[in-house]
Amino acid sequence: MKIGWRGLVGVAISVALLWWTLRGESLADVWNVLRESNVLLFLLSAAVATLSFPMRAWRWRYILEPSAGTLPFGPLWRATAIGMMVNNVSPARAGELARGYVLSLETKRVRFATALASLVVDRVFDTVVVLLLLLGVTSLPGFPANAIVFGWPVGRILLVGAASALVALAVLVVMALDPERLVRMANPIVGRIAPRFMDRVRLFVLSFTAGLGVLRDPRRSAIVFAWALAQWLVNGASFWIAFLAVGLDAPFTAALFLQSLLAFAVALPSAPGFFGVFEAGTKVALRVYGIDDTFAVSYALGYHLLSFLPITLIGLWYLGRMGLHLKDLGRDQAAKDQGG
């Protein structure tokens, strides 16, 4: 996979944020905190964090069920592991495309466009759940009043996030309910610009909207929401266990708050693996709870590295077993995209 200008911007942002995070910190002090941490609890936190990925794969099964029927767990899990690995080693969140491509490669029941749409749904559910958890945490009596994160009041972050999620969800529901209208809207445009691609565009649009089918089914949507909530609570537990490993005196709600802010922070352009963005976001979020910067930075580095390794190694292992290479994914995804 080539690194384009967006990737270069992401790397620059990551480097700048890492510099800001480590500025004024003694690396000796950071190392002392990590050296005195509970290694077993840190490893447990990494294991719990890794557990959230098969949970995500299982949730994906329900999202795809209306268009592909009940898929076996194996292909969903392998695609998820490879996709998350690619996010960790490649720029521009290319793992989302890789995840859809690998699933469409493993099973002919899912076209690439359908898988891609299902992943959009997947991320919208993520956003809704994360916002609800953030709203719950900030509504508790013990939450620090007038909390500011990166210069923004937390209430404004909630407002902007909620508005974005609602608009995205509304657009997806409209697309899911009337896919033929999208085809009719696209036909005149494609007919003027590239008439020879009209059939291909129609197939892509219909395949894409097929991946949104879960939004037409309230029961399945409720199941997907429940799995998303469970997954994010498990992931939050991994953050809290790492608190215990470092010796941070912070409640479980602080872990949910940290997780929610990081979920938005990693949407920024960054280097592969979200390095820099993760550490800066952790430092800012834990300041809200009055946690010392040295402990926050030590925690961020330890948790990030330990949670980064398992899914990256698992994804690389599956990639090798399938006879695929990272450099091939971008080219093959493009070919899949063109073929619908």
Image: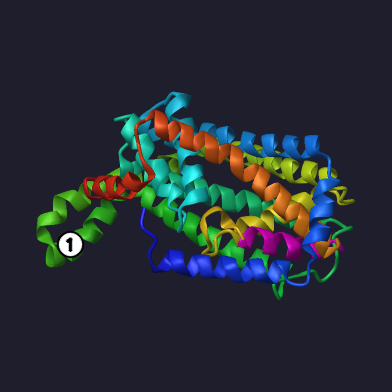
Residue 159 found in image quarter: bottom right
Q: Is residue 82 above or below residue 285?
A: above
Residue 82 visible within the image: yes
Residue 184 found in image quarter: bottom left
Q: Main secondary structure of the magenta part?
A: helix
Q: Is residue 233 above or below residue 182?
A: above
The residue lying at 79 percent from left, 41 percent from top is: 241
Say which of 185 and 47 sits in front: 47
| Residue, disc 1 | 190
**Magenta region includes residue 312:** no
The residue lying at 26 percent from left, 48 percent from top is: 204
The residues colored magenta run 276-290
Residue 211 visible within the image: no
Say which of 326 and 278 sits in front: 326
The residue lying at 40 percent from left, 28 percent from top is: 321
Question: Which quarter shows the C terminus?
Answer: top left
Say which of 236 and 40 sits in front: 40
Q: Is residue 140 left or right of residue 118?
A: right
Where residue 54 sits: x, y (%)? 56, 32
The residue lying at 68 percent from left, 71 percent from top is: 20
Colouring convention used in this rendered image of the protein = rainbow
Q: Is residue 88 left or right of residue 137?
A: left
Where residue 166 sits: x, y (%)? 54, 59
**Magenta region includes residue 287:** yes
Q: Is residue 265 left or right of residue 119?
A: right
Where residue 225 sits: x, y (%)? 59, 41
Q: As shown in the figure, which amino acid type bears the numbered disc 1? A: Val
Circle 1: element type: helix
Neighbour class for label 1 at 10 Å: few (<14), some, many (≥20)? some
Q: Is residue 287 above or below residue 250?
A: below
